Each structure stands twice: as C-alpha cells, then as structure tokens.
Image (cartoon, rainbow, N blue to C red):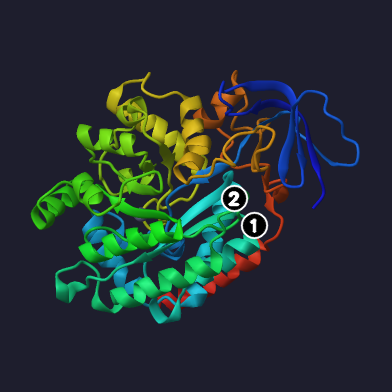
Amino acid sequence: MPDILIRNADVVVTMDARRSELRGADVLIRGGIIAGVGPGLSDEGVEVIEARGCVVTPGLVNTHHHLYQTLTRAVPGGQDALLFGWLKTLYPIWARFGPEEMFVSAQVGLAELALSGCTLTSDHLYLFPNGARLDDTIAAAGEVGLRFHPTRGAMSIGESAGGLPPDSLVETETAILEDMIRVVDRFHDPLPGAMVRVGLAPCSPFSVSRELMRDSALLARDKRVMLHAHLAENDEDIAYSLERFGCRPGQYAEDLGWTGADVWHAHCVKLDGSEIELFNQSRTGISHCPCSNCRLGSGIAPIRAMRDAGCLVGLGVDGSASNDAGNLVAEARMAMLLQRVALGADAMGAREALEIATLGGAQVLGRDDLGSVEPGKRADLAIWDLRGVEAAGAWDPVAALILCGPGRVRDLIVEGRQIVRDGQLVRLDLSRLLEQQRRLAVRLAG
Ligand SMILES: [Zn+2]
C-alpha cells in the first residue's frame, strides 16, 4: 500500500474537538493512518492526489442497513404500506434468497454506499434462507473494500407462535446462539483499525423471544462485541410493546441488558423524554434513518432533543427495500431537513448533519480510531469535487455538501487504500456486478 498525500484541498473538514476547517490544506497518510494535516506537507516518496477544488471530510459512517434488501427495491406491493404490512409483502420474496442473492445484493448496496462517501457500514442480516450465511456479506465487503460491521441478526417467533414472519424464515434459538458464537469467533477483530467487527442483533422485540434478547446480551458481553436491534420505530411498535410486554420499549431494552455503550438501536422515532435520558445516561447509541422513516410514514425522530440531551446519534440508510436509496450524504440532508420540518429552519445546520454522518456514526459504532481527520486516526476519507454543476454557485463549500451537492464522491480512501478513484470503484467491475444483479432479478420475479 503506497503512502498518500492529498494535496491542496480547498477545505479539510477535520471534525476534531474544535471542529476545525482548514483551508488550502494537505492530508498525509502513512501505513493506513493519518500522519499529518495542514498546509505544505512534504510529498517525498508518496503518491499524490490533487484536491484543488475539493472538500475533504472524514468518511461517512452508516450505522443501519439491510444490504440483502438491495435486490428488492420498489416492490409494487410494498411501496405504500406501513411497516408491518410492508414486511408481510416482502417476506415471501426474501424466503427465495440464497447465498448468491446475499452476496450480490450486498455488493450492489456497498458499491452504492461507497460512491456516496461511506467508508464504514454496519449491516443487519436477520434471515438466512436456503443456506445463506453472514459469511456471504463479509466476503462481499472484502471485495468492495469498505470497513464492515456486520451483525448476526435473528428471528425466532414465526406466524404460528403469534409473530410476524412466516415460519419458514425463523430459526430455533439454539441454532441462532450457536451461529452467533461461530461468526464472532471466526470474523470479529477487536483491534484498532479493524476492517471487520461482528455484532449480535436479534431483529426486533416483535420477532424474537424475551429469552433470546437476554441471552444474546449475555453472549455479547462475554465476547465483548456490540448489540443492535430495531426499537421504537413507529406507533404500532409502541402499542405492541405496551400490549405484549406491559412496558415501553426503553424499559424493555433496559430490563434485558439492551442499554449501554456497547448497544445501538435503529430508528428510536418514538422514544419519549425519559427514554432519551436513559439512552444518554447509559451511552446507548441511536441510528437515525430519516428517509426510511419518511418512506414508511413512521414519523420524525426527536433528534434535536436527543442531541441536546447529549445522546450519541449516527445515521442509517436502512434497508434498500424501505428507502429505497443507499446514499448516505442524501440521508444527512434528509436528517437536517426533517428537524426543520418539525422545529423550524434553525433546528439543524448543514455542519451538524455532516457531523452526525461522520463522527457521530463512528461514536455510535464504538470506533474511537475513526471519524475525524487527525494525526493517529485511521485514514478513512472522502474527497468531494465541488467544481461540478451541483455545487456551482455555492458560497460555502462545506455547507454545500449537504445543502446542494455533489451527491457522489470523487475519491474514497479506506484504511489508506483508495477504493473510489475519479468517481469509479477501483476494485469492483460495476457493470459486471449489475449484470449479475439483473440475472438474479429475473430468477426472483419468476
Ligand atoms: Zn432496519
């Protein structure tokens, strides 16, 4: 891996403690780590990437996704349904998936994320039909070159037991726990700079038992890995929790060991004031998925209140069957706009949205080795060319990233390796991948 100097960026957005923005600055990368940030750094013995006309930011971090859903975007029966009805339309299609669908779907989703500036993504895979395994998505991420936090999800309560998914898509809780142990032992890397970290992620309180929630929390602590689930997504979710468990989702999570700095929950649209305080005190992370929340009509998450309270908040594009885009910078824009719809034009600025999309996501995923452009941090960087038509006329290049564009990166660097160059994926033949995807689409529709 060559050392790299990114030279003459119009602005380097550092996301350091003072949120410094450096004009006309360079970033030096040695051995996958940021070695220097500032003007006039030496280019001796390094590969130079010219960044005049560009803004450099930390790589964007995606804290919630279901990559397998990329092959089921814009499915007619699910386009206008609420969450539970939407799931019931899609379950029978997902039941036809196998390892190849998981791999191709993940690669398409990861390619899309990379092109929108994402350097680290988590994934929540909670169904394993026809021999599919978490391994399929980990192999996909290795080829694209993104840093990857896959979570071993699970569903154990099928229709016959009063749950939502068909019985064919659920597993026994013994098999789930055994496979959780297998994938953590095989793939999890706890060290700084890790390219793969595995988490445990029963799908949601309405698709697994109380026992599995508790047992997976115990297992996660034993193995020192993180926990992830969907929580408090919409009104139906709250009603289900009250009726079935006799308490709100925050209480349910706390009772079963599902709060703490090693836990993050997706959505949290309906958390109330005391739950926000619980999440803040316990350092439980929140993955905000604004486009999905709009798409499924779930509501506007109280992100302003959460941030004011001090909560850890990151962004998630959510699965491509409920967004249906996987563009993380567009997600940051939507996060900003939605708070303004709820609270007024001064509710969230472009810089705060960018912070949530970068540093915020890294904090939610427990990555203190990432999320800012500072010496000693891993070199995960996005380079945005502001000279195109989208940002033409912009007076503030940093705000322009969120307020207008561009919506795609020029270059992307992960752990010091360039994985997007001049707007093209370096390691992956995208047209070949899309051909594979079209072949699978015919098979799934048939
Ligand atoms: Zn989700």
The front one of 435 and 19 is 19
Residue 282 is at least partly visible in this image: yes
Disc 1 CB within 8 Å of nearest ligand 1 atom: no
Give 176 or 295, whichever is nearer the viewer.
176
- Image quadrant of ligand 1 equals bottom left
Q: Quadrant of residue 17?
A: top right
Residue 114 disc label? 2
Q: Which residue is mark 1?
A: 145
Categorize mark 2 by other alpha carbons within 10 Å: few (<14), some (14-19), many (20+). Answer: many
Q: Which residue is painted at 52% across and 76% down in the image? A: 100
Query: Residue 332: image x %, image y %?
Result: 46, 36
Q: Which-is-in-front pick, marks 1 and 2?
A: 1
Residue drawn 45% across and 56% down?
Answer: 225
Q: Are marks 1 and 2 in contact (CB under 8 Å)?
A: yes
User: Where is residue 1 shown, x and y percent of the image?
Assistant: 79, 53
What's under tag 1, amino acid-wise? Gly
**Relative vertical location of residue 93 with respect to residue 1 in this rendering, above or below:** below
Q: In the picture shown, does residue 156 fall above or below 206?
A: below
Residue in the image at 28% along x and 79% along y: 168
When asked about the image quadrant of residue 84, the answer is bottom left
- Coordinates of residue 370 in the picture (x, y in percent): 59, 41
Mark 2 is on which residue type?
A: Ala
Q: How far apart are the alpha carbons under marks 1 and 2?
A: 9 Å
Ligand 1 within 8 angstroms of badge 2 C-beta: no
Residue at the image point whose x is 62% and y is 28% from the top:
14
